[in-house]
């Protein structure tokens, strides 16, 4: 009798699904894309590609800059376009969107060739720590750069690659000639933009030079 009751109870459990493992393999998995969310919150659409920002933030997570400020050179664009963006990550705010020069041997209107070699007069790609303010004989106040990637940009100091101001990087020059002038490999900025950005970038922000690679 007890066996009969137990058998009935067991059959009822099977019928009700009590012993059947539910299949959850088809349940949707939602993974938050924190970098895309930050990109949207900073209002970067149309200013810098999402891919560039995501790669920049991967570098930010890797190198842990002491300042929560990033600068991105987007060299997928031609030099007649504004392609230098500075973002305050704490405030989720774009601080600057302006012109930037590439190296004279990297290309004419668009930078297509890059190098870490001395005397190449080409732009180097990748991540740089922005260092202290220095005074140069040729360019006046400028910012030191330390290349963070071996074999890609770690000759930055030896090449004297700095962020400096340049008369040939400005709106009026672009209107007259259709492009910015070119540097010896430095990411040169408009003089007025550099003056404003120098205290923001100096001593610990992160620079990322991107070319879609």
Image: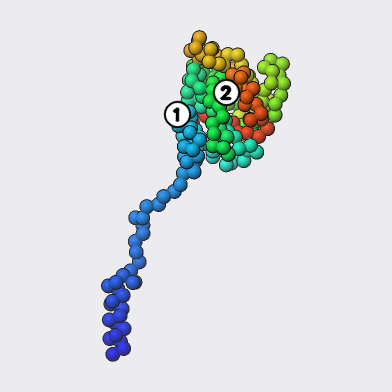
Which residue is pictured at 65% across the width and 26% down the height? Answer: 198
Dot 2 lies on which element? loop
Which residue is pictured at 58% across the width and 26% down the height? Answer: 124
Numbered label attached to residue 113 = none
Label 1 vs label 2: CA separation? 24 Å
**Can you say whether 148 is above or below 79 in the image?**
below
- The reply to whether callout 1 and callout 2 are in contact (CB within 8 Å) is no
Quarter of the rendering containing residue 159 = top right
| Residue 99 appears anywhere in the view | yes
Q: Residues within 10 Å of mark 1 (few under 14, many from 20)?
A: few
Image location (x, y in percent) of residue 193: 60, 22
* Residue named by callout 1: 46
Image location (x, y in percent) of residue 93: 54, 34
Image location (x, y in percent) of residue 120: 60, 20
Going from N to C along the chain, the mark reached first, 1 or 2, is 1
Numbered label attached to residue 123 = 2
Which of the two residues, 211 or 41, is positioned nearer the viewer here? 41
Image location (x, y in percent) of residue 144: 67, 27
Which residue is pictured at 48% across the width and 30% down the height? Answer: 48
**Can you say whether 64 is above or below 173 in the image?**
below
């Amino acid at each position: 009798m007890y066996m009969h009751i137990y058998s009935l109870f067991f059959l009822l459990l099977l019928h009700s699904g009590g012993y059947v493992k539910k299949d959850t393999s088809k349940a949707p998995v939602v993974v938050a894309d924190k970098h895309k969310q930050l990109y949207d919150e900073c209002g970067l659409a149309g200013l810098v590609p999402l891919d560039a920002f995501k790669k920049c933030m991967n570098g930010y997570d890797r190198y842990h800059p002491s300042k929560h400020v990033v600068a991105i050179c987007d060299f997928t664009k031609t030099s007649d376009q504004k392609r230098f963006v500075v973002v305050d990550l704490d405030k989720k705010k774009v601080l600057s969107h302006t012109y930037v020069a590439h190296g004279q041997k990297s290309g004419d209107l668009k930078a297509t060739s890059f190098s870490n070699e001395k005397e190449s007069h080409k732009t180097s790609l990748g991540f740089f720590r922005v260092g202290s303010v220095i005074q140069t004989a040729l360019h006046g106040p400028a910012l030191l750069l330390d290349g963070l990637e071996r074999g890609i940009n770690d000759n930055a100091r030896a090449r004297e690659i700095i962020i400096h101001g340049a008369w040939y990087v400005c709106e009026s020059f672009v209107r007259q000639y259709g492009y910015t002038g070119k540097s010896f490999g430095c990411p040169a900025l408009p003089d007025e933009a550099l003056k404003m950005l120098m205290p923001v970038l100096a001593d610990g922000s992160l620079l990322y030079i991107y070319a879609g690679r």
